[in-house]
Amino acid sequence: DKVTGSLPNYPYMKNLVPEDYDFTKYEPLGGDRFIEYVEGDSPYAITDSLREQSDNLARSRRVHVLKAMKHIWKNYKEYAFGMDELHPISKKGSANWGGMGTTLVDALDTLWLMGMKDEFWEARDWVRDHLSHDKVGDVSGFETTIRSLGGLLSAYDLSGDKVFLDKADDLGAKLFKAYDTPSGLPRGSVNLQSGRAKNFGWNGNAYILAEVGTQQIEYRYLSRATGKQEYAKKSEKVFDILDKITPEDGLLFEKLKDDGRKGVSFVSGKTSFGAMGDSTYEYMIKLWIQGGRKEDMYRKMWDKAMNGVHAQLVQKSKPNGLTYLADRVNGRTDHKMDHLACFMGGSLALGAYTDPSGIDSSRAKRDLKTAKALTYTCYQMYARTKTGISPEFVKFSGGEDFVVPSSAPFYILRPEAVEAFYYLSVLTGDPIYREWGWEVFQSIEKYCKTKYGYGSLHDVNDPSMEPEDRMESFFLAETLKYLYLLFDPDSEIDILHKHVFNTEAHPVKIFKNDEDN
């Protein structure tokens, strides 16, 4: 890295964390610290010796993320093994995803990457002997693709065990019936037993942007692994359709309709990098990377969209100039940002470091600076609350940068901020992202941990409230995985040269050439 910091040496290096560290004594440290990072600058020189110190510190923190996973897995195995979710307070198991072992499948690659190989192979045996999709009714095509299909494919990619590929092919074939539509856009809900697919009534039966555009990494990989080309062709067609109807500014709207012969058109006036839009943009840059950086359409869609983001959505708060991405509704700016949108810190950085014009080009510099500035804001969404944990979204208004809205003060164990910390840590080498990640992890340990797992928080500004009895599978698949990888300098994962993560943090190898299987 040619990062020359203008300030003296990096001042935040901490002592190694002891194995018996007591998280209950942790007190959140408050916001408005590290303000030299607010603009997206790299204030300190990143030297080899600094990286080495940071790596040693990280290894002492990694131990504790592993302990968190072991805490969950012990209880999942005892009380809910093979169930979709473990409830972290009542210790009940539930089949709320239709009985597909969602937590187990979503966590397979996390077990592998954390070195929990005995638990991994035991879970493999459950997949081999008990996982069945034959009697499952209506499921979300998008959620099942990113969690279950992605989880099986990543487990196959890491371990080479064909059990996972066979189950993935079985699930993929059932989910893929959603693509039998006039235009080829996949419907939102599919019945795995009957093959019938439909869109959601609550959404006026429209197609949702994030759902149609966040399945391609999975199906392209499945296509290569099985030799069944239809998986790739039909799923890729969605991006051909989106490319044709992309507005001049590159920003897509979150709902679409399929008019048969007349084609596909947008039916909503809302553009957002939060819910319903987010991951389609993420897959533009990641599909280009997955394909060995050869399929220019995806990269062009990404770069066009990022120009639109900078022209229209990037905002600065008052009074401290925090960078955020607003929503756009019918041409007007809505000054709110979902926690979900924090993924953009990682995606913008990935786009910058893989820019065909080079990391020193003006575009890559712009995107990296925004990535860092946005990620500082996402860190502030945590640091400024009383628990040190971010709410579901924040509103940027008045003179206090942002406020936690009364309608969404909750935290459901989401991963997007620590995902951004992971990407920026790996790509820039700046130890600050591990610092922020450690603060977030300490708050999760203190406020979300239960006897049997980790639970959601009802109000991030009320430290006295107990966690809720809900633990999403993505806490194991994404939040703990990204935290572990953030502190794991010895990982086999290589985001620049070897791997691409789906939107549920399931890594698969990128395609090297056309002969690669």
Image (cartoon, helix red, strand yellow):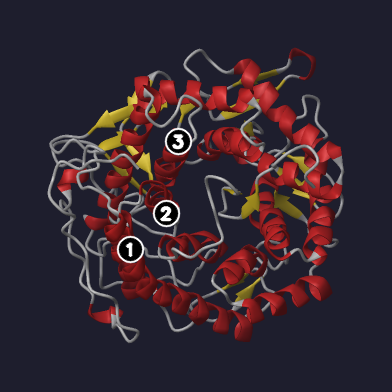
Q: Nearer the viewer, residue 32 or 448?
A: 32
Query: Neighbour class for label 3 at 10 Å: few (<14), some, many (≥20)?
Result: many
Element class at badge 1: helix
Q: Nearer the viewer, residue 88 or 429?
A: 429
In the figure, 393 relative to 115: above or below? above
Mark 1 → mark 3, Cα distance in angstroms: 35 Å
Mark 1 → mark 2, Cα distance in angstroms: 17 Å
What numbered label is drawn on residue 52? Answer: 1
In the figure, 462 relative to 18: above or below? above
Label 3 vs label 2, nearer the camera: 2
Q: Nearer the viewer, residue 188 or 347?
A: 347
Residue 365 in percent (x, y) is at 34, 30
Residue ID for mark 2: 422
Sequence order check, earlier mark of 1 and 3 = 1
Q: Inspect the image, locate mark 2, and give the three-letter code of the amino acid beneath it.
A: Tyr
Element class at badge 3: loop
| Residue 251 visible in the displayed image | yes
Q: Quadrant for residue 374, please give it.
A: top left
Question: What residue is drawn where x is 84% and y is 62%?
Answer: 135
- Circles 1 and 2 in contact, beta carbons < 8 Å: no
Residue 25 in percent (x, y) is at 23, 80
| Residue 132 visible in the displayed image | no
